[in-house]
Image (cartoon, helix red, strand yellow):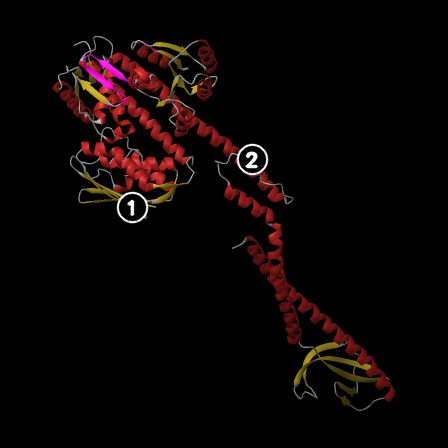
Amino acid sequence: MKLLLVEDHDELANNISGYLAKEGYVVETVLGQQRAISKLTGFDYDVVLLDLMLPDGSGMDVLEYIKSHYPDIGVLIISAKNALDDKVKGLELGADDYLPKPFHLSELNARVKAIYRRRQMSGHSKMVFNEITIDTVTIEVVVCDTTLDLTRKEYELLLFLLVNKNRVLTKQSIAEHLWGDYMDAMDSFDFVYQHIKNLRKKITAAGGKDYIQTMYGSGYKFNSNL
Amino acid sequence: MRLILKITIIYLLISFVVFLLGGIITFEVINREVDLEEQRFLRERLSSVSNMIERRDLDKPFKRDKISIEPLTKGKETEIVFSDTLVMHATLQRMEPHVKLDVVREINNKFYKISLYDLIVEEDDIAEGVQESLIKMYVLLTVVVLILSGLTSLWLLKPFNKTLGLIKDFSLQQKVNEEFPKSNTTEFDKLNRFLNDMTLKMKRDYQIMKEFTENAAHEMQTPISIANGKLEMLINSDNITDEQSAMIASAQNSLRRLSKLNEALSLLTKIDNQEFEKRDEVNISTALERQIYDFEELINLKSIALKKKIEGNVKVNIDQVLCGIMITNLLQNAIRHNVESGELSIVLSKKSLKITNTGEPLTVSPQELFDRFKKGNQSKQSLGLGLAIVKKICDVNDFTIEYTYDQNRHRIEIIF
């Protein structure tokens, strides 16, 4: 997968490209609107990560350019402006998703993959990892030929873990992924633990390996190297 | 009281004093003139009386109405002396004040004591006359001044009233600035010029402040993002002990709180800056149902018994975004501060929204509950801004918010 990152903050761009590069993506970074457009005319990309506040203009202009010239490219807006107007406008202009800063890199990774999956739906609706198969269209998980009876949240949790496999996911990032802003209604991340426990049980009951590793004090990791 | 009425009343009071003094002066002047006139009249009579005495060569006392002549055996001429006296009036048959002229004259080598009387115009009569005419003039003046001041003020104060109207309609939100017009009245022109400068400056300052708050809020999110990302990469690097990763997770937690705090404060500022002046007719029933649905899982996770009674199609005039934030914060508050296996009741009617939840008693006074950073209990994840935001939203939309605590139940009621 080839990504174009349009972000004027060096450090943030380094974080993102560093994290996503480990996933095996090719990430190219440009700092401004002009460079972004010239890159887009010269090369092919699958997904563009777009910051809205750029030194030489608004990211919205880049978005319009992409949608009129390369409608096949997925666009994920990453913005410090958590303004509803921007979100609505961005999505109306054809952006695939909107992620307000600050975000977890694991969350960004999950969103990018989701965009990629949706865009490539024809052949790749199934994610396969060893004995686990996830169908992202029918929202079904099959482990060792047994279809798991998962709740919507358990399904999302498994997908989030698998997409970020071999990465430490803090309870906080998991809670934010599952409940978004509503997670503020909870005092602790005990609920994350509950969901993980149930998910583990269901996978091992179907004969799958216990890939979910507890990182004491911080979170969980989907360990593929068992 | 209207300015013009005040000015008129002050003017009339001053005129009253002037009229009073004027009355006294008029009275004095008329009195003096009348006296002089009477004295002149008596002097003229004296010369005709002298002529008569000379003609008739009078030698015995002569007494007629208002004339009395008395021949004297000896004497000497005296100056004319005027005095006031009471004399029986022949026709009126009562004592009336008269002016009296006394003189001794030598005519044909004989001395005569001559006394002449004349009925005088009484001071009372003059005073009455002056009083009557002045009162009538004063009444006339009052009526005319009141009517005219009313009429002229309409015309004179027209530019001022226009200015007032413009000030009343003034809003920092307005993009276009309506100019305060020029006026040919110096004071109003000065006022309008001053207002023009002032509003322009206010708008500029407001714009700068607004941009600053927004930019500060946005700019803060980027470094938080960077720090968060670094920590995420750090936690995934090799050879990290459990202890270290726990520290990293806790640092990330704090960063999240910082970012949420920043968002909440900038939201409060935005509400303060009246950036949510839009009034949509929001169907609060559906908005509430939708949010309860979103929160349902969390409610179940905490084994909270939910009771709801939501009247359909309750419409409230409020900015859609603010309405959503208000409901989110209320529900969040009622769930977070609830106890395990507690209760939550949500009642919506056309009049109000009542949210009641079980929970520990407050550690702060109920009056302080809606203040910023006052937490009812020191819940770790709580920012202490949720209810402050709800309160602010209620304030800008003229809703009343009430809090009561009874039998371990917190109840917040918002009356539309």
Determine whether, in the image, residue A49 is placed left or right of residue B24: left
Subunit under mark 2: B
Residue drawn where x is 56% and y is 48% of the image: B161
Where are the magenta residues, as a range? A125-137
Disc 1 crowd rating (10 Å Cα; few below 14, some 14-19, many 20+) is few
Disc 2 crowd rating (10 Å Cα; few below 14, some 14-19, many 20+) is few
Specify whether residue A96 is painted magenta: no
Read off the residue under disc 1.
B311
* The N terminus of chain A lies in quadrant: top left
Q: Nearer the viewer, residue A53 or A97?
A: A97
Residue A72 seen from this side: yes
Q: Quadrant of residue B182?
A: top right
- Residue B416 position in % (x across, y down): 34, 46
Q: Amino acid at mark 2?
A: Asp
Q: Nearer the viewer, residue A149 or B260?
A: A149
Q: Quadrant of residue B337?
A: top left
- Residue A203 position in % (x across, y down): 15, 19
Label for residue A101? none
- Residue B39 position in % (x across, y down): 75, 75
Q: Nearer the viewer, residue A47 or B360?
A: A47
Residue B78 seen from this side: no
